[in-house]
Image (cartoon, rainbow, N blue to C red):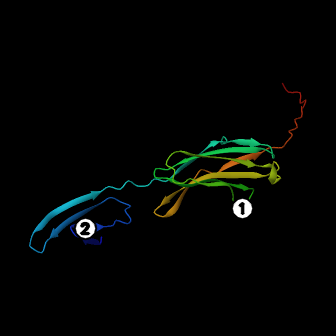
Amino acid sequence: MPLTIEGNVIRGTLTDLRKSTSFEFSADAADGMTLEPIRFQIRVHLDRKPQVQFIEPPEELVVTPTTDVPMLVEADDDLGLFKVGVMYQINGGPMESLIEQNAEGSIEAFQLPSTLMLEGHSLSHQDAVTYFAFAEDNYFGEPRRTTTPLRFIDIRPFKLAFQLLDTGGT
């Protein structure tokens, strides 16, 4: 570690500490005086990944093709969230962003409400809707993303028809 001397002050900069370490300082003056070695220990508290979960909707969801699906995501991080959002996909199409919001370094539980409006997608009972939530923190200048497990929405027909059969059974 490079050090600079300014008068009777020595300065150094630690730029990237990802694990605990220790340092030992000693000095010799021009007049022969010595500083006995001094040992410093730095314990690093590692940045944990953000946590994210759905509060709403329930994991198993069966709806009609025109349902508005309310969603509520909750995320938190030990050192501060960067971004929270929800992504969804219709059938095998591209993954699309339903909502994405800057969490502005929040260390408190951050809640993100949104609504997935199925009516605009012309769905039928043969279609599949998948979705997940994500949370990102800032890990040494790079975003680090955590996601929920992939969830599914089952589409049921508007009308279900039942038929009574007389098979002679009991």
* Disc sitting over residue 79 in the figure: none
- What residue occupies the far left of the structure in this picture? 32
* Amino acid type, mark 1: Pro
* Amino acid type, mark 2: Ile
* Disc sitting over residue 10 in the figure: 2
Where residue 153 appears, as percent x and y from the top left, is 72, 47
Mark 2 or 1: in front is: 2
Front residue of 110 and 158: 110
Where residue 59 appears, as percent x and y from the top left, is 65, 42
Specify the quadrant that holds the N terminus. Answer: bottom left
Residue 10 falls left or right of residue 61: left
- Looking at the rendered structure, the number of numbered marks drawn on it comes to 2
Residue 46 falls left or right of residue 68: left
The vertical placement of 59 against 165, above or below, is: below
- What residue occupies the far front of the structure in this picture? 7
Specify the quadrant that holds the C terminus. Answer: top right
Q: Residues within 10 Å of mark 1 (few under 14, many from 20)?
A: few
- What residue occupies the far top of the structure in this picture? 170
Question: What is the quadrant of residue 57 in the picture?
Answer: top right
Front residue of 166 and 74: 74
- Residue at the image point whose x is 19% and y is 61% from the top: 38
- Residue at the image point whose x is 14% and y is 71% from the top: 28
Front residue of 15 and 127: 15
Where residue 45 appears, as percent x and y from the top left, is 38, 53
User: What is the distance, in whole Å, between disc 2 and disc 1 at their CAs?
Assistant: 56 Å
**Numbered disc 1: secondary structure:** loop
- Residue at the image point whose x is 73% and y is 51% from the top: 129
Where residue 2 appears, as percent x and y from the top left, is 29, 72
**Numbered disc 2: secondary structure:** strand
Mark found first going from the N terminus, 2 or 1: 2
The vertical placement of 147 against 69, above or below, is: below
**Residue tagged 1:** 94
